[in-house]
Image (tube, grey):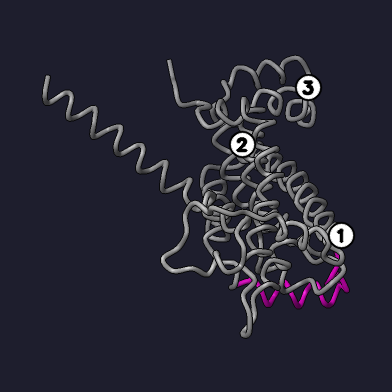
Amino acid sequence: MKFNYFQVSFKYTFLITIIFIFIFPTFWLFTTSIKFEIDALQFPPIFFPERITIQNYIKVIDSENIFNYFTNSFSISILSTFFGVILGSMAAFSLSKYYLSFRIRQGLLIWILIIRIFPPIVTAIPYFVIMRNLKLTDTQLGLIITHTTFVLPFVIWLMLGFFQDLPKEIDQAAIIDGCSFKQRFFHISLPLTLPGLATTSIFTFIYSWTEFLYASMLTSRNAKTLPVVIAGFMSDKFLRWGEMTALASLMIVPVLIFAFWAQKYLISGLTFGAVKE
């Protein structure tokens, strides 16, 4: 019994430690956003501020064009997620079938995986040159195209597993009933993988919402997104912790709302195909 008690205690201690590690950065972000500047710079740091202020949030909300930047980030993230998930799901559905030979499908998947492994900085200059030649720099369209192309490998590999977990008999029955490729994808396979679709959409949205490299390189004013605005609070002469953490805290809200709205699909999507009979 003592051994079991020790084992259970160790398990819960380990879980609490992991939860604390994940929650603490968010806790620190929020508490810093409601501190006065002098308290935010204190050492040793103040974990639980005795006095709070909302002036940092007021300064951020009153900033010039802040709502335009929110609109830019939201529009770019939603459209990038939509196009990335739809196009990636279509590619994944095609690669999950046996229309191509095994070697060709494996070659395509390995090539897609290699593209995903590349760090973003490797393709930064080519993307900039292409967008400049197309006159799409500092436009939402240019950033939407960039984000969509970058998330496609991730969507393809993630959705591929969901499509492969579907029973083959469903697709075969649809073919016998005379369904076209389009009908089998949009009316049969896609609805059945809705949990996986929701999971993929959330991860894709988070990437586009928080992406900084391409946004800072391809935008200057009109299409500037929130991560670039947050970086503007840092310079070689000052570091405005209050406004920076306040805006970062506000950035978390849409992601939480999106995840909360799709939580039932997210949980089932993360375990989709995990149990086999």
Q: In this view, does 218 lie above or below 245?
A: below
**Alpha carbon distance from label 3 to label 1:** 45 Å
Q: Quadrant of the N terminus?
A: top left
Q: Which residue is drawn at 41% across and 66% down?
A: 44
Q: Which residue is drawn at 70% across and 75% down?
A: 126
Label 2: how many Cα within 10 Å (few below 14, some 14–19, many 20+): many
Q: Residue at x 71, y 71 (%)?
A: 216
Q: Name the residue under label 3.
A: 179
**Magenta: predominant secondary structure element?**
helix
Write the start and end of the magenta stretch as one range: 122-140
Q: Mark 2 points at which residue?
A: 199
- Residue 222 location (% of width, % of height): 87, 68
Specify whether residue 53 is painted magenta.
no
Q: Mark 1 points at which residue?
A: 68
**Mark 3: which secondary structure?**
loop
Q: Quadrant of residue 38?
A: bottom right
Label 1: how many Cα within 10 Å (few below 14, some 14–19, many 20+): some
Side (left or right) of 185 relative to 170: right
